[in-house]
Amino acid sequence: MRAAGGVAVRREGTMMTRNRNLKRRIRLRMAKTGESYTAARRHVAPADRSAAVFERDVPADYLARAAATPIARTYKSLALEKLRLPAGATVLDIGCGTGEDLSPLLDAVGPHGSVIGVDVDENALATARGSHNDEQLRLLRADAHELDFADASVEAVHTDRTLQHVDSPQRMLRELRRVLVPGGTAVFAEPDWQTLIVDCPAPRLSAAYRRFVEERVIRNARIGSELPRLVRRAGFELDSVTPVTAVYTDAYEADRILGFARVTHRAVAEGCFGTHDAGEWLAHLSGDVFFASLTIFIVAAHATESG
Ligand SMILES: C[S@@+](CC[C@H](N)C(=O)[O-])C[C@H]1O[C@@H](n2cnc3c(N)ncnc32)[C@H](O)[C@@H]1O
C-alpha cells in the first residue's frame, strides 16, 4: 500500500489485476500500431502511477526540476523574448536562485554584454557558481530591496518568481526602476495563486487548500495580478501582460512542482486542515483522474526617459 504522509491511498489487492490489464492494453496497442513497448506504454499509461509517491520535502534540485518542465521552458523563453535584450547589454537576474536562467541571458547579451545574478541565498548562489564559469557573469549575494548599483546603470532587469517571496514587492520594484537606464527593459514573471484550480468533487477542500496557500504559504500570493499596478507605481511604463497557464493532469507530476502533499501536511500541522479532510483531499488527488492549473503572468515594462 502506498501512503501519502500517513494517508493510505492505494488498495494493494487491485494492483496485480491493474498491472495485468495494463500489459494487455500495451500489447494490443503494439500489435495495432507497430510501436515499441516503451512508446506504446507511454501512450497507454502516460505516467507510471504505480511507482509514484507524493513528496514530503523540497528536493535540493527543485529549481532545476521546475525549470525543466515544458511549461517553464515555454514561459521562460517568452519572458526572455519580451526582455528584448540588445547584444552588449548588462542585465540583472534578480533572485537568480541556482542559475536556471543565466545561460539564456548570457547567450542573449553575447560576448560584449554581462549578466549579474543577485540572490539572498548563498547556497543557491554556490550551486549557480558550480555550473557557470563565464567571464561575463557576476553572482552577488544581496537583498534586492537595496542594491549596490548606481542609478541608471543597467539596461535590463529580469525576475522569475522572486517578487512572490519578498518583503515588499513595491519597494523592490522602485529599486529596480532606479538602477535601470532610461529606455531600459524589465520583465517580471510571477504566478497568481488566486488562479490555482484543483478539481475536486468536494470543492470546499480545493477552496480551503487555495486559501491556505494564499494566506500562509506564499507571502505575496496575488502578485501576478497586482504587478501591472505595482510596476506603474514604481515608475515603469507598462508594455504588456501575458498570462501563461500551466495545466497538470497527473497528480504526482503536479505534486513535484506545486508540493500538494507537503503543503497539505503543513496545513494540518498549522490547524488549517483537519486530518480527516486532509485524508479525503490526498486520497482524491491520488485517484485516477486529476486536473489542476495555475497561471503565471509575464509583465513587460520599460523605464521612460522622464521617469
Ligand atoms: C522561486 S526562486 C526562483 C529562482 C529563479 N529565478 C528561477 O526561476 O529558478 C526565488 C528566488 O528569489 C530569491 N529571493 C527571495 N527574496 C529575495 C531578495 N529580497 N533579494 C534577492 N533574492 C531574493 C530566493 O532566494 C530564491 O532563490
Image: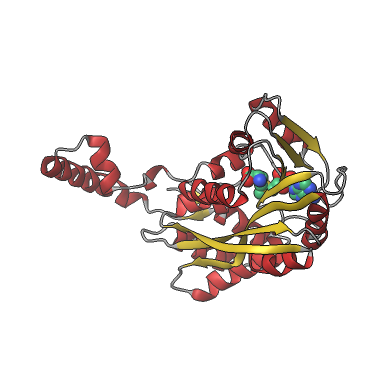
Q: How is the image coloured?
A: secondary structure
Furthest residue to the left?
31
Residue sitting at x 45%, y 48%: 2
Q: Picture coordinates of residue 287 (x, y %)?
A: 40, 59
Q: Is residue 274 above or below residue 14?
A: below
Q: Is residue 74 above or below residue 201?
A: above
Q: Picture coordinates of residue 270 (x, y %)?
A: 71, 62
Q: Picture coordinates of residue 216 (x, y %)?
A: 71, 63
The quarter of the image holding the C terminus is bottom right
**Count of marks, rendered view:** 0
Residue sitting at x 60%, y 48%: 84
User: Taking the image as drawn, is residue 102 in sight?
Assistant: yes
Residue sitting at x 62%, y 32%: 110
For residue 100, which quarter of the picture? Answer: top right
| Residue situated in front as seen by the camera: 295 or 55 | 295
For residue 228, which quarter of the picture? Answer: bottom right
Q: Picture coordinates of residue 271 (x, y %)?
A: 69, 66
| Residue situated in front as seen by the camera: 27 or 112 | 112
User: Taking the image as drawn, is residue 5 in sight?
Assistant: no
| Residue situated in front as seen by the camera: 301 or 118 | 301
Furthest residue to the front?
305
Q: Is residue 29 left or right of residue 53?
A: left
Q: Is residue 287 left or right of residue 45?
A: right
Residue sitting at x 30%, y 52%: 14
Q: Is residue 134 above or below residue 225?
A: above
| Residue situated in front as seen by the camera: 111 or 288 | 111
Q: Is residue 20 left or right of residue 126?
A: left
